[in-house]
Amino acid sequence: MKTVDLVVPCFNEEEVLPEFVRVTNQVIATLPEYSFRYILVNDGSRDGTLSVMESLAKEFDNVKYISFSRNFGKEAAMYAGLEHTSADYVFVMDADLQHPPAMFPQMLAEVSKGHDCCALYREERKGDGGALRTGFSKLFFKLQNSMSSVKMPYGAVDYRVMSRQMVDSIVAMSEAQRFSKGLFCWVGFDTKWLPYENVERTIGTSSWSFWGLFKYAIDGITAFSVSPLKWIFVIGILMLLGAFGLLLAWIIMAIVAEGGTVVPTLCGIFFVGGIIETSLGIIGEYMGRVYIETKNRPIYIAKTKNIEKNEK
Ligand code: UDP
Ligand code: MG
């Protein structure tokens, strides 16, 4: 019998977690040819998520959990979960039932056919913020795909099933500033993309702020591409050419009209200043990344858990 681990990051999900397990168990019951296990990761929730996990673990012996000492973020939670898996197939999904477990049979069918991974992208962003958020989200996917060698379809979500081999190669990448959407693509392998219809969150609230998503997008771009650094060089060259042009114009003006004006000079100063400032900002972003990465800190710290690595 093939084994399946379900990695579920949870942050303040006490309300939805019992419902999540109940709904998922119904789907599991229709798939007797697989043996399922939950790996719930409590990402430093401030509500009763941990005690819900503990009582679920008492009720069902296929419920395992890892509980962090504080909130380390969804990326760290996914990493901790993946690191503790040992099954043939591994799912990553949200706890809020926005990633319908009803997709299991279809997704498992794809990996048993021989795909290394089956991932979902949403067709519609129903109930997921206004037009502004959708617009930025589209822009992000465009930028990400044009700037880095890692390509992903628009609307790709963190709901997927992967083969053991693919999970092992993701766990082997121990970088601290994780951007899983990119990492899943970066490792390669053969991914089957399936569309699904986005479900509105009915219990609890989304914990992402607009600013949080913006930072997430910057992470995604800088983690997989150094092209902003190349732009700086190109802009620098263009500016040098521009400066030579201006110098020439100034000389001609001085000869023909006897002197230029102060305003264009001021404009120039602001322009050059702005460019330098922006460039420094971009360089700073990468420098910061190098700085964080060289610290080599653990990605998460678990306080309690009822599962060991490589436990079957
Ligand atoms: N999550 C987490 N740590 C965090 C924020 C979120 O583990 O710091 C989990 C959360 O419990 C949920 C998933 O990540 O299972 C997606 O979070 P959410 O529903 O808030 O995001 P959205 O669906 O809006 O992208
Ligand atoms: Mg959600």
Image (cartoon, rainbow, N blue to C red):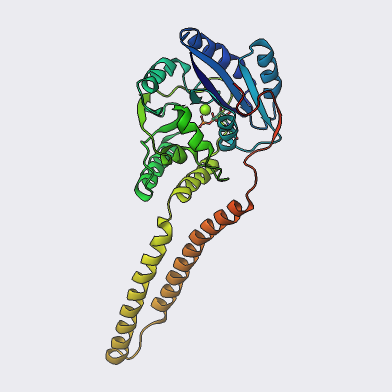
Q: Is residue 269 visible?
A: yes
| Quadrant of the rendered image containing residue 264 | bottom left
**x%, y% of residue 274?**
46, 66
- Tell whether 95 sits left or right of 129: right
Q: Is residue 292 above or below residue 99?
A: below
Rendered image quadrant of residue 53: top right
**Picture coordinates of residue 205, whole percent (x, y):** 57, 27
Give the quarter the ligand 1 occupies: top right
- Give the percent coordinates (x, y) of residue 27: 48, 11
Q: In the displayed structure, would residue 84 be above or below residue 3?
A: below
Looking at the rendered structure, the number of numbered marks drawn on it comes to 0
Q: Out of 46 and 200, give the one closest to the viewer.
A: 46
Q: Is residue 192 left or right of residue 56?
A: left
- Is 166 above or below relative to 109? below
Q: Is residue 129 visible?
A: no
The residue lying toward the viewer, choosing from 295 and 154, is: 295
**198 lies above or below 299:** above
Give the quadrant of the C terminus: top right
Foreground pick, 290 / 46: 290
Counting from the top left corner in percent of width and height, residue 203 is at: 57, 20
Which residue does the image show at 52% across and 42% down from the upper left?
173
Residue at image location 36% in from the left, 75% down from the top: 240
Side (left or right) of 249 relative to 106: left
